[in-house]
Amino acid sequence: MSSQLKGIFFDDIGSYPLPKGVRLGSLSRDQYLQLVRDVLAQKRNAGVEVPTYPQFRNMIRMFMDLLEDPELTESPYLIKREHAKIMELEAVPPGQSVRVCVSGPIELYISAFGATNYTDILYTLAESVARFLAEAKGEGRMVVASIDEPSLGMSSNIVFSEDEICRALEIASSPCLDMDCEVHLHSPLYAECCARVPGINILGVESAAHPDYLKLIDKKVLDETDTYIRAGIARTDILSMSAGLNEQYGINLWDDMIRLEREVLNMESPLVMEKRLEKAYTQFGGRLRATGPDCGLGSWPSQDMAGKILANCADAVRSFLKKNRI
């Protein structure tokens, strides 16, 4: 599978804190796009090589609101090609490209239908996902694609067979056969299934918060399917991190934001992240394709703090690449 990117690249997952005091409902369309543009610049300034457009909007509703509009669909849940547009991509400056994330067909399906198994609707949603990706690719703004399936392997509402799940992902990723396409997972249980999908070539694993997840990935399967790993090297579960720190110190760090920031950034230092990256590289070698934070940063208390964790990531990646001459 060819790619415009070389070696190991540093990307992020997407969500990001809003500026203090800003509410989405109060912004005009132009103001919203300027906010997206500003955050893309923040991410690049922090050292993110392939930033994702910031997901300020709900990851489900930003797609389902379109898919449930009869004026924008040619049949139920099948978006018309001319309306398969992601508004945030309008904010990408000329000459720049980004990681484009689209909520996956399984994620979209269970949000609307729960524990049912209407495979025809699942495949229709998958075709709509493919159309969003195809449109983004055609606009020339997408250098990496991502199909976000955080519930896959986690939710008891998923009752489709593995073959049906693989087929849906195959449909969804079909525009990405000649480029890097990630699947963003919160569990590695379906990693082998995803690895066998022709359009997906990178498995995203949350290995910072859950280092044992890497042990569940079989490198032989990656070699057989020509698939790669995206290793998370920075924890983003700030509520869990702060809870552990609160218990350790016997205080509530949320009452002292300056100390919270200091403790979290010390806990997630460049050195700590680099050691995680070294571990992933030791296990997967050339099958390690991408790295960055585990998940999005939307739950973090400020844009400044989110930017600093990305900068720590960037320092770790630069040091690792330099030491290993990659």
Image (cartoon, helix red, strand yellow):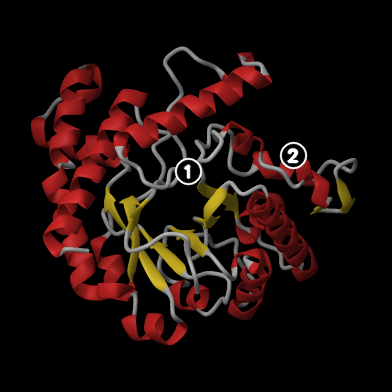
Percent position of residue 231, x then y: 31, 60
Instruction: State the residue at coordinates (14%, 31%).
Output: 263
Q: Quadrant of residue 198?
A: bottom right
Calculate the distance from the C-alpha at mark 2 to the C-alpha at mark 1. 21 Å
Kind of residue indicated by mark 1? Thr
Residue at disc 2, secondary structure: helix
Instruction: State the residue at coordinates (44%, 80%).
Output: 226
Q: Quadrant of residue 156?
A: bottom right
Question: Which residue is labeled 2 in the image?
Answer: 65
Kind of residue indicated by mark 2? Asp
Question: Which residue is labeled 1 in the image?
Answer: 52
Percent position of residue 117, x then y: 72, 68
Residue that extends furthest to the front in the rendered view of this protein: 95
Query: Would residue 156 appear left or right of 320 to someone viewing this image?
Result: right
Residue 188 or residue 268, whichever sits in front: 268
- Of the numbered discs 2 and 1, the one sitting upstream in the chain is 1
Query: Would residue 7 appear left or right of 259 to someone viewing this image?
Result: right
Dots 2, 1 in contact, CB < 8 A: no
Look at the picture and state if 285 lies above or below 247. Answer: below
Find residue 280 and name its label.
none
Look at the picture and state if 239 lies above or below 32. Answer: below
Percent position of residue 74, x then y: 90, 52
Label 2 CA crowd tier, 10 Å (few <14, some 14–19, many 20+): few
Q: Quadrant of residue 134?
A: bottom right
Instruction: State the residue at coordinates (59%, 25%).
Output: 33
